[in-house]
Image (tube, rainbow, N blue to C red):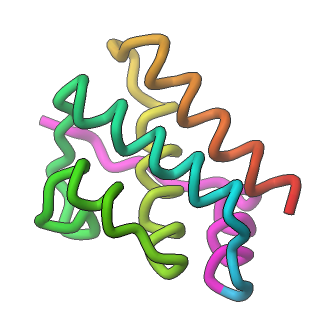
Amino acid sequence: MQRKISLDENAKKLIKKCEDKEVDTSVMGACTVLLEEMDREEVEFNDEDIPNESYIEMAQNIKPQDVPKVLIMAFKIKERNKIEPELKIAANRLIRAIESL
């Protein structure tokens, strides 16, 4: 059973930042890498906020409006204990890329 994470103020600000402005291509690339890693590791979320399509499909069809959803997934990944290091690195990379916008 997955526990629901509560986002801190910094996380909420980053999500709002993604929603309020056009996202540059470097952030889209970081989203794609994270989604591909999630597909490779078969990460599952029991959450209504997560789209029904596969992570690979999301990566192939990513649009700027998808970035906030992927960012939320990145924060959820950071909270998990038993997760592959490559996946945590990809999540952290995405978060840092958005912080630098």
Is 66 situated left or right of 67 in this image? Answer: left
Is 50 situated left or right of 99 in this image? Answer: left
Residue drawn at point x = 70 percent, y = 83 percent: 22
Is 47 situated left or right of 78 in this image? Answer: left
Residue drawn at point x = 32 percent, y = 49 percent: 4
- In the image, residue 28 lies at what x, y percent? 58, 60
Q: How many marks?
A: 0
**Residue at the outermost bottom position:** 20
Q: Is residue 25 above or below residue 80?
A: below
Residue drawn at point x = 48 percent, y = 16 percent: 86
- Magenta stretch bounds: 1-19
| Rendered-image quadrant of the N terminus | top left
Residue 18 location, quadrant: bottom right
The one of 39 and 25 positioned closer to us in this rendering: 25
- In the image, residue 85 lies at what x, y percent? 48, 11
Q: Is residue 11 above or below residue 24?
A: above
Q: Is residue 28 above or below residue 19?
A: above
| Rendered-image quadrant of the C terminus | bottom right
Residue drawn at point x = 59 percent, y = 46 percent: 30
The one of 93 and 24 positioned closer to us in this rendering: 24
Is 33 situated left or right of 15 in this image? Answer: left
- Residue 8: say if magenta: yes
- In the image, residue 78 lies at what x, y percent? 51, 31
- In the image, residue 11 lies at what x, y percent? 67, 57
